[in-house]
Image (cartoon, helix red, strand yellow):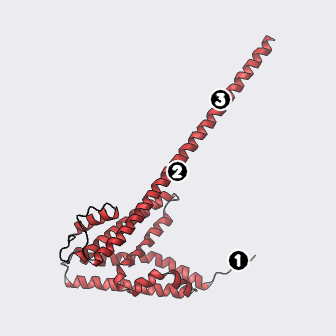
Amino acid sequence: MSTPVANPRQARYRAYEHVSERLAPVVAGLWLVAYALPVLQPELPGAVRTACHVVRTGVWAAFGVDYLLRLSLSGHRLRFFVTHPLDLLLLLLPMLQPLRLLRIVTVLRLLNQRAGTRLRGRVGLYVTASTILIGFSAACAVLEAERPAPGATITTFGEALWWVVTTITTVGYGDFAPVTTTGRVVAVGLMLSGIALVGVVTGSLASWFLDEVRDSSGQDAEATRADVAELAAEVRRLREQLAAQEAAGG
């Protein structure tokens, strides 16, 4: 039987995806640095701020080219268009450009593929990396929005981080709260992310406990079967001894 020949377009698409998935984390990391640096250091020289703006714009354009290439190589453009609405939305709405950081999940997928076979290890890695990424990005975003606002309580990165921790863990002390519309939008996204992360952590812990109980039950059952087998062997030896004594006495 002859081996079916792969579609050349599909082969090119898979080859491009293979390269893109490895370059995307690097490019997204550059975007994160170029975005966070002016926020964390508002007194940067004008040339540095301009360079950061150029990097952010270049990254946005690079992801636009990436989208068009994947659309062209997919072979099913309508299906690709329907199944990737968020990618197109983030390209058409520059005001949502910080959400391009979602491309960094490619790093997590690659780490997942190279991780061990135990699901809990991959989930733990994913949750840890996602929490750090989301928390840092949210702290920068809320600080950028709140710092120049009149009556703002979040004016330093330390206060922004504290607000992120209390929000993402659903504690919400209320000592710091955004007063701008942008800050509140960030807060809503962080709250939803916190609920999702707490759910993943809870589910992972529940799975771990169930596995431990199942392993313990299996070990107990195995030990019980071994004890029963040993007892049965002892009973057989006693019967054989009794039968031998009766035969000798007879």
Any mark on residue 231, and which?
3
User: Is residue 1 in view?
Assistant: yes
Does label 3 or label 1 sit earlier along the sequence?
Answer: 1
Q: Amino acid at mark 3?
A: Leu
CA gap between label 2 and label 1 equals 42 Å
The local secondary structure at tag 1 comes to loop
Residues at circles 3 and 2 in contact by the CB criterion of under 8 Å: no
The N terminus sits in image quarter: bottom right
Which numbered circle lies on residue 95? none
Residue 191 percent coordinates (x, y):
36, 68
Crowd class of label 2 (few under 14; some 14 to 19; many from 20; radius 10 Å): few
Helix, strand or loop at label 3? It is helix
Task: Evaluate if marks 2 and 1 touch, with contact meaning CB atoms under 8 Å apart.
Answer: no
The crowding category of the residue bearing disc 3, from other C-alpha atoms within 10 Å (few below 14, some 14 to 19, many at least 20), is: few
Q: Disc 2 or disc 1, which is closer to the eye?
A: 2
Looking at the picture, does residue 226 appear above or below residue 41? above
Q: Residue at x 45, y 85 (%)?
A: 88
Mark earlier in primary sequence (3, 2): 2
In the picture provided, is 175 more to the left or to the right than 33? left
Q: Is residue 11 left or right of residue 105?
A: right
Within-10-Å neighbours for mark 1: few <14, some 14–19, many 20+: few
Give the position of the C terminus as an image quadrant: top right
The structure residue drawn at horizontal position 23% and vertical position 69%, both measured from the top left corner, is 157
The location of residue 208, given as percent across then percent down, is 48, 52
**At 78% from the left edge and 11% from the top edge, which residue is drawn?**
249
Residue 141 percent across, percent down from the top left = 29, 75
Separation of marks 3 and 2 at Cα, in angstroms: 30 Å
Q: Which residue is mark 1?
A: 3
Q: What kind of residue is marked 1?
A: Thr
The residue tagged 2 is 211
Where, by quadrant of the figure, is residue 124 drawn? bottom left
